[in-house]
Image (tube, grey):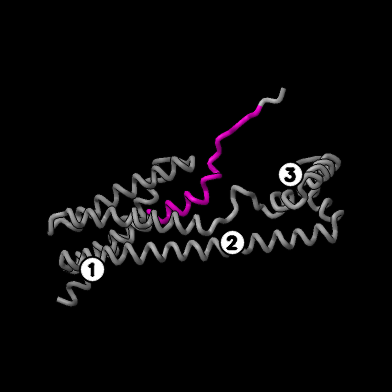
Amino acid sequence: MMIKHRERHKTGRIGWLRAAVLGANDGIVSTASLIIGVAAAGGSSRNILVAGLAGLVAGAMSMAAGEYVSVYSQADTESAEIEREKRELEVDDEGERMELAGIYVSRGLEPRLARQVADQLMAHDALAAHARDELGITEVMTARPLQAAGFSAVSFSLGAAMPLIASILAPGTWVITTVALSSLIFLAVLGAIAARAGGAGVVKGAMRVLFWGAMAMLATDLVGRLFGTAVG
């Protein structure tokens, strides 16, 4: 009797997790930094709100477009490589078997066993075997442009909404402090969640996004103050 052994790995989450985390992180950092910069320059509550909303919309569209183009380019490359491999299999079947066997030998199999494995895998699905073991293309890791674009746009919007709401609720003189502190808390939570979902260290993940988020907000605060002083 054959016992099915099922393991729960994190690799299936890589595509959407990367896009979602990147989008939310960028939404929080860029919008919070924009709001802090405008506030530091002496902008009114209306200026801050308009800047935050504009940053949210522009950022979400930019993230979606950027992810779509980037991941679609990856998908095009994968398709071209698979088509090339298909032609090579049609022209030189024996050479492709030897190539696959060589890959398995380099991974530790004896030459004879490697050839047997290559023959059996190619008999089952030659193209899939070469795509996986020669090109490194699998169903789990394959590029999905629309999925990446959608996750990026939605996650950016959600991330950007957090500092925007904080700026609306904050008293006039406390906008910078409120937005900065709340955004750092959001970033820490996001980093911890992303790290846990990916199977990595929670503290390390939180500290990583906290550091870069703090640097970005500090930089825009400085620019806003310098600009506000110069204009004033």
- Amino acid carrying label 2: it is Gln
Q: Residue at x 34, y 54 (%)?
A: 159
Mark 3 / mark 1, whichever is N-terminal: 3
Pointer 1 residue: 224
How far across and down, in percent of the image, does residue 61 sit?
40, 65
Q: Which residues are magenta?
A: 4-24
- Above or below, 53 against 110 in this view is below
Q: How far is mark 3 from mark 1, CA to CA? A: 56 Å
Instruction: State the CA–CA distance, disc 3 to disc 2.
Output: 26 Å
The residue closer to the viewer here, 106 or 4, is 4
Give residue 107's mark: 3
User: Quick one: SS at disc 1?
Assistant: helix
Q: Is residue 16 magenta?
A: yes
Measured as percent of width and height from the top left, residue 171 is found at 13, 55
Say if residue 74 shows up in the picture: yes
Which residue is located at x 26 percent, y 63 percent?
Answer: 52
Q: Which residue is mark 2?
A: 74
